[in-house]
Image (cartoon, rainbow, N blue to C red):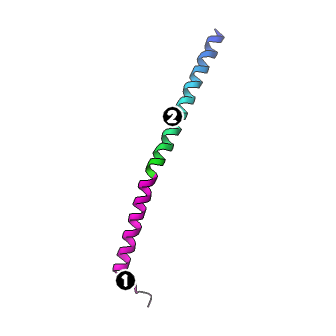
Amino acid sequence: MEEFFLHLWDEIDDLIGVCRHVAGVTAAEMLAASAPLIAATSGALLAGAATMLLSHRELLVFIA
């Protein structure tokens, strides 16, 4: 009977290991896939902010 439970425990441990591996790989793939989108969005926001600031320079003359 002990051998049955040891075998069952081993199978459950293998299944948990597979689930952890799949979860880790899925998270890594999602992060790798979203990195270019995040970079493009950041670039667009930076370009938009720079354009807005340069087109309204008169509003930035509060120091003088």
- Give the residue displayed 65% in from the left and 11% down from the top: 3
The residue tagged 1 is 57
Name the secondary structure under disc 2: helix
Q: Main secondary structure of the magenta part?
A: helix
- Give the residue displayed 48% in from the left and 39% down from the top: 26
Q: Nearer the viewer, residue 52 or 12?
A: 52
Residue 29 at x, y = what percent?
48, 43
Determine the residue located farthest toward the right in the rendered image.
Answer: 2
Residue type (three-letter) at the residue carrying disc 1:
Arg
Q: Which mark is residue 22?
A: 2
Compare marks 1 and 2 and give the one earlier in the sequence. Answer: 2
Q: Please tell me whether residue 3 is drawn above or below residue 26 in the rendered image.
A: above
Q: Which mark is residue 41?
A: none
**Quadrant position of the C terminus in the picture:** bottom left
Determine the residue located farthest toward the top in the rendered image.
Answer: 1
35 on left or right of 58: right
